[in-house]
Image (cartoon, grey):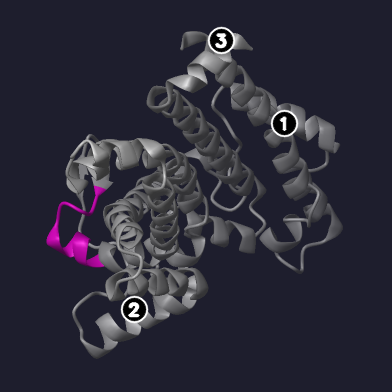
Amino acid sequence: MLAFAAKRLAQSIVVVFIMSALVFVGVYAIGNPVDILINPQADQAEIAAATRALGLDQPLWRQYWNFISGAFAGDLGKSFAANIPAVRLIFERMPATLELALAAMVIAVLLGIPLGLWAGLKPDTVSGRAIMAGSILGFSLPTFWVGLMLIMVFSVWLGWLPPTGRGATVMVLGLPVSFLTWDGLAHLFMPALNLALFKLSLLIRLTRAGTREALAQDYVRFARAKGLSMERVVRVHVLKNIMIPIVTVTGLEFGSVIAFAIVTETIFAWPGMGKLLIDSINVLDRPVIVAYLLIIVLIFVLINLLVDLAYTALDPRVRLAGRST
């Protein structure tokens, strides 16, 4: 187990280093933030001074070297627009994004697995077919349109939920959270549901496919032939085997929820990292953009590492295969 974890950790470090270079070059090779940040009537001397102050007069390789040197010390550069560390800006917004992503995944898991299991056990019933039809809608409907419809129905027509913002928060371990207050929950519900819709549909279809496949296996038929109840067969044999791909996909999708919550955060004015990224792109605030993308890469790599370790815990054959190689 330790050897497997060390191998995955080494691979993760290489991935982070390669992605840092790609992200930095991809962002710093496009556009000129000086044209946006300074007065349009500035003369050439003022433009040159601003370029030197931002370090943009140096060659790209030198800028990347300075970035890497600072990154090892935890410094990913200062925001061009706010003139404060980019990491500080992102970490101020990160709790809101993580809370939204966790709420979305909780909704997706708590609804997706039971609904997918039901659809797999009873595929020919009206309820089973309705669940699958609903999952197709979840895949097909655009996120921004669903968000607008949620605001129209629950905020404008019914007046039940607030349309935008995060609501009241309380401090827990030094971090602001909104799900511990009624006002915060009211603000959290619609954006979390909007963000969870696609993941919910994915888990429904994945669970249904795994259930149908597991029910056709010999070990399930043997368990039924021994006289075990269907409830026990599903709980002990079916769920145990379908959880391996579900855990893998859930972990990876959690990373994508964090990375691609931009649309939902913009629609509901949720003060998270996604909205910060949009604001930074509008002014070509390169340090914030690079820091955001690099932190997302780190989150993805960490989640992949944890998923791999969870996979080995759920399936001992992975550990055995690792030892044999």
Q: Nearer the viewer, mark 2 or mark 3?
A: 3
Residue 150 is labelled as 2
| 52, 97: nearer the viewer | 97
The residue depicted at 47 percent of the width and 45 percent of the height is 249
The secondary element bearing badge 3 is classed as helix
Residue marked by disc 3: 323
Q: Nearer the viewer, mark 1 or mark 3?
A: 3
Q: Earlier in the sequence, mark 2 or mark 3?
A: 2
Residue type at tag 1: Ile
Locate residue 218, reporting x and y percent: 40, 38
Residue type at tag 2: Leu
| 319, 50: nearer the viewer | 319
Residue count near mark 2 (Cα–Cα under 10 Å), binned few <14, some 14–19, many ≥20 = some
User: From this viewpoint, is residue 220 visible?
Assistant: yes
Q: Residue furthest bottom?
A: 157
Magenta stretch contains residue 58: no
Q: Distance from label 1 to label 3 (Cα)?
A: 28 Å
The residue depicted at 64 percent of the width and 12 percent of the height is 325
The residue depicted at 70 percent of the width and 42 percent of the height is 23
Q: Which residues are magenta?
A: 177-187
Residue count near mark 1 (Cα–Cα under 10 Å), binned few <14, some 14–19, many ≥20 = few
Q: Distance from label 2 to label 3 (Cα)?
A: 51 Å
Q: Distance from label 2 to label 1 (Cα)?
A: 40 Å
- The answer to whether 243 appears left or right of 225 in the picture is right
Residue marked by disc 1: 18
Quadrant in the picture for residue 12: top right
Locate residue 310, reporting x and y percent: 41, 28
Residue type at tag 3: Arg
Vertical placement of residue 209 versus 123, above or below: above
